[in-house]
């Protein structure tokens, strides 16, 4: 799964309110949903969440690290708003 290089590349909905800050798993799940939509594999949120959980639990700490860094950046931005 290609990880966004930064928080700016993460596909975020355009809303007038400040969204709740995301943890690293939610960043990963959102990216998985985006990739699934691009490849037209599934748009069922339950299927994507189940797959995300399975993949995330099998991922190494180094694989999770980039998502953790993005979540930390989003958390910092959230506190600035």
Image (cartoon, helix red, strand yellow):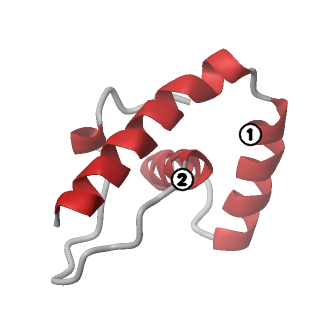
Give the alpha-carbon distance from disc 2 to disc 1, as whole Å.
13 Å
Q: Position of residue 38 (x, y in %)?
A: 42, 49
Residue 45 vs 6, above or below: the answer is below
Where disc 2 sits, the SS reads: loop
Residue ranking furthest to the top: 62
> Is residue 45 toward the left or the right of residue 28 in the image?
right
Q: Residue at x 41, y 63 (%)?
A: 21
Assign a secondary structure to mark 1. Answer: helix
- Residue 68 spot, x, y in % from top left: 51, 35
- In the image, farthest residue toward the bottom: 16
Provide the residue designation for mark 2: 23
In the rendered image, the quadrant that contains the N terminus is: top right
Q: Residues within 10 Å of mark 2 (few under 14, many from 20)?
A: some
Residue 31 or residue 38, whichever sits in front? 31
Left or right, residue 49 beside residue 74:
right
Q: Position of residue 75 (x, y in %)?
A: 36, 52
Mark nearer the viewer, 2 or 1? 2
Look at the image and tell me in which quarter the C terminus lies: bottom left
Q: Position of residue 37 (x, y in %)?
A: 47, 56
**Is residue 29 shown left or right of residue 50?**
left
- Residue shown at 29% from the left, 32% from the top: 6
Tell which of 44 and 22 is nearer to you. Answer: 22
User: Which quarter of the figure has residue 47?
Assistant: bottom right
Tell me the crowding category of disc 1: few under 14, some 14 to 19, or many 20 or more residues within 10 angstroms, Cα based. some
- Residue in the picture at 64% in, 71% down: 45
Query: Is tag 2's residue or tag 1's residue first in the polypeptide sequence?
Result: 2
Tag 1 residue: 56
Between 50 and 81, the one lying in front of the other is: 81
Residue at image coords 78%, 50%: 53
């Amino acid at each position: 799964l290609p990880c966004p290089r930064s928080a700016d590349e993460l596909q975020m909905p355009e809303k007038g309110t400040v969204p709740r800050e995301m943890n690293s798993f939610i960043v990963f799940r959102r990216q998985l949903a985006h990739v699934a939509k691009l490849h037209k594999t599934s748009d069922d949120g339950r299927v994507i969440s189940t797959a995300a959980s399975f993949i995330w639990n099998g991922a190494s700490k180094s694989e999770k690290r980039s998502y953790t860094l993005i979540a930390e950046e989003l958390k910092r931005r959230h506190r600035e708003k």
